[in-house]
Image (tube, rainbow, N blue to C red):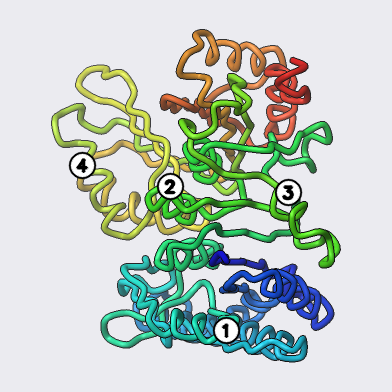
Amino acid sequence: MALIVHKYGGTSMGSTERIRNVAKRVAKWARAGHQMVVVPSAMSGETNRLLGLAKELSPGKHTPALARELDAIAATGEQVSVGLLAIALQAEGLEAVSYAGWQVAVATDSSFTKARIESIDDKRVRADLAAGKVVVITGFQGIDPDGHVTTLGRGGSDTSAVAIAAALKAAECLIYTDVDGVYTTDPRVVPEARRLSTITFEEMLEMASLGSKILQIRSVEFAGKYRVPLRVLSSFTPWDIDITEEAASGTLITFEQEDENMEQAVVSGIAFNRDEAKVTLLGVPDKPGIAFQILGPVAEANIDIDVIIQNVSHDGKTDFSFTVHRNDYTRTMELLQNTVGPATNASKVLGDPKICKVSIVGIGMRSHVGVASKMFRALSEEGINIQMISTSEIKTSVVIDEKYMELAVRALHKAFDLDQDAAAA
């Protein structure tokens, strides 16, 4: 008997019929002798609907008080889901009980709308599992030290599921989504994209951080840190598929050293992110501490910074560019124009919300030279100008004009032969 965690996304929970199918699938695993914990998302579109209602009433200014209420509202979507799923499981003849994050409890910090999990009390869950019950727990939410309901940010149910799997020392955490695994890139952009049977945590972490929407980045961080075996698979396969076949399907996210037979392609995938914006301060003094003067206030405003470039100095002045999430673009521009720009004597503040980031990812890049130049050549041949470059051991990212994103992804996918199996390449 193994303790297994299942996570189901909003699409999988999108109607009572789909919830019934989820219950039948979970029941199959439970009847096979496994202890089952299930973490469902809110029904498809429900969180957007709830936050849309709040937006209609919102005064517009994003304050901590507003953020607290947004979390209180958004958290109700998952509470509906767990109750419905528990009822569906009971209809299947199983004992099932649902809990909200604060009932478990999933303890978080107080960063409303993007809280981080600090600990999970597993006593209540373990007692129910020992009594033969299926436990259904809300994803996406927890409770802070002051007793306030918090949410973990978009995709937070993935993080909840992996954190719960880690706390319970689950044998495996299965993430059921509307896709059947992790692909070399988005098949909607490149129809020739291949599903990967395995991918390392390092590669998945880079893919998630660079724009892949399959898993939230924090869920991959949790899985890697606590060594939780993680599998991404489809919830739209028939619920009565043979459990052995289902348990081996999708994409296994694994550790490099544990899988010597893994495909060792130089590049495993192409990630892209169109939700970025670039800002530039022109003519700032080129002196020690200038980066902190610029980026310190941005960080204090809780704005995440991605790619950073400081140009070569001319006459004691330099230009400083960085990228932020497009949702933070307006706030960042206001901060630079009203506070940071004047404080640093910048000659001008420029912004461009129509950029994107395209990245190649692969652990094979560690042991191969010329990978970046091959990337740059492929983009050059398509007439695509590179605005910014960022690299690590296993990835190279470029910032380009948004209108060239799909062309760039297709060109790179072809250049690195990702449409071919590693064995055939």
The x, y position of residue 424, in whole percent, is 77, 17
Task: Give the residue type that dot 2 points to.
Answer: Gly
User: Horizontally, is 309 left or right of 416 in the view?
Assistant: left
| Element on which disc 2 rests | helix
Q: Earlier in the sequence, mark 3 or mark 1?
A: 1
For disc 3, the marked residue is 249
Amino acid type assigned to the residue bearing label 1 in the image: Gly
Q: In the image, residue 385 lies at what x, y percent?
A: 60, 21
Q: Residue furthest top?
A: 370
**As shown in the figure, which amino acid type bears the numbered disc 4?**
Phe
Mark 1 and mark 2: Cα distance apart in space = 29 Å
- Mark 3–mark 1 Cα distance, whole angstroms, equals 27 Å
Residue at the disc numbered 1: 132
Q: Can you say whether 266 is above or below 23 in the image?
A: above
Please state which amino acid type lies under the numbered disc 3: Ser
Q: Mark 1: few, some, or many residues within 10 Å (few <14, many ≥20)?
A: some
Question: Is 415 or 321 nearer to us in this picture?
Answer: 415
Residue drawn at the location 51% of the way across and 19% of the way down:
365
| Circle 3 crowding by C-alpha within 10 Å: few under 14, some 14–19, many from 20 | some
Residue 89: x, y in percent?
71, 85
> Which element is circle 4 on?
helix
Classed neighbour count for the residue bearing mark 2: other residues with Cα under 10 Å, few (<14), some (14–19), many (≥20): many
Q: How far apart are the two marked residues, 4 and 2, measured between alpha carbons? A: 31 Å
* Residue nearest the observer in this picture, 227 or 46: 227
Sequence-wise, which precedes: disc 4 or disc 1? 1
Q: Which residue is mark 4?
A: 292
